[in-house]
Image (cartoon, grey):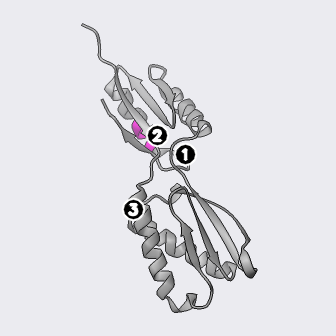
Amino acid sequence: MATQQHSFDIVSKVDLQELDNALNQARKEIDTRFDFRGTGSRIEGGRDSLVVFSSDEFHLRAMMEVIEARLVKREVPLEALAWGPVADGPKGTVKREAKILQGIDSDKAREITKFVKRLDKKINVAVQQEQVRISSKSKDALQEAMKAVRENDFAIPLQFTNYR
């Protein structure tokens, strides 16, 4: 009788509906808060990236705090946004762009692969598009790998799917 191979995938996906809900709540709060009146503060975008605009860096930081609070409330990981530097915007304003991270890029996939390989030599690791497949004959080895990956900070939100 052949022993069965078990596996799971490590993915990095953002619930875009929850992200959208969080951004809409942040927009409403920014539109109604007295301290943002007359600052031209606004949030644009929402699928691949978003850009925040305001009259100065102080209000820009305050907007980011509002956005992050809404993301946390809606259980969207803050690591899902990669903020760029503050830049000059139109008409003397400042802006800051954030890329919305979806999928595991090749550098991160390599980092995860090396990490898992160091745990146990009997575990097989394969990078498939924007996810990493972990497989082994031992369910215990897979559970240990899952626990170790969960405890290590790879600076991107990770989920585990297709556990077989």
Q: Amino acid at mark 1?
A: Phe
How far across and down, in percent of the image, does residue 58 sit? 66, 81
Relative horizontal placement of residue 149, taking residue 41 as reference (left or right): left
Residue projecting furthest to the top:
1
Residue 98 seen anywhere in this rendered image of the structure: yes
> Looking at the image, is 71 positioned above or below residue 66?
above
Q: Amino acid at mark 3?
A: Glu
Front residue (pair 69, 143): 69
Front residue (pair 28, 160): 28
**Residue 149 marker:** 2
Circle 3: is it few (<14), some (14-19), or many (20+) Cα within 10 Å? some
Q: Which sits earlier in the primary sequence, circle 3 or circle 2?
A: 3
Mark 3 and mark 2: Cα distance apart in space: 24 Å
> Looking at the image, is 127 positioned above or below residue 157?
above
**Residue 68 marker:** none
- What kind of element bears circle 2? helix
Q: Which residue is mark 1?
A: 154
Q: Which sits earlier in the primary sequence, circle 3 or circle 1?
A: 3
How far across and down, in percent of the image, does residue 101 sit? 54, 51
Mark 2 and mark 1: Cα distance apart in space: 8 Å
Residue drawn where x is 57% and y is 77% of the image: 42
Residue numbers of the magenta segment: 146-150
Residues tagged 3 and 1 counted as in contact (Cβ below 8 A): no
Q: Which sits earlier in the primary sequence, circle 2 or circle 1?
A: 2
How far across and down, in percent of the image, does residue 158 sit? 46, 46
Instruction: Residue 135: say if magenta.
Output: no
Relative horizontal placement of residue 13, taking residue 58 as reference (left or right): left
Residue 72 seen anywhere in this rendered image of the structure: no
Nearest to the eye among marks 3 and 2: give it.
Answer: 3
- What kind of element bears circle 3? helix
Q: Amino acid at mark 2?
A: Val
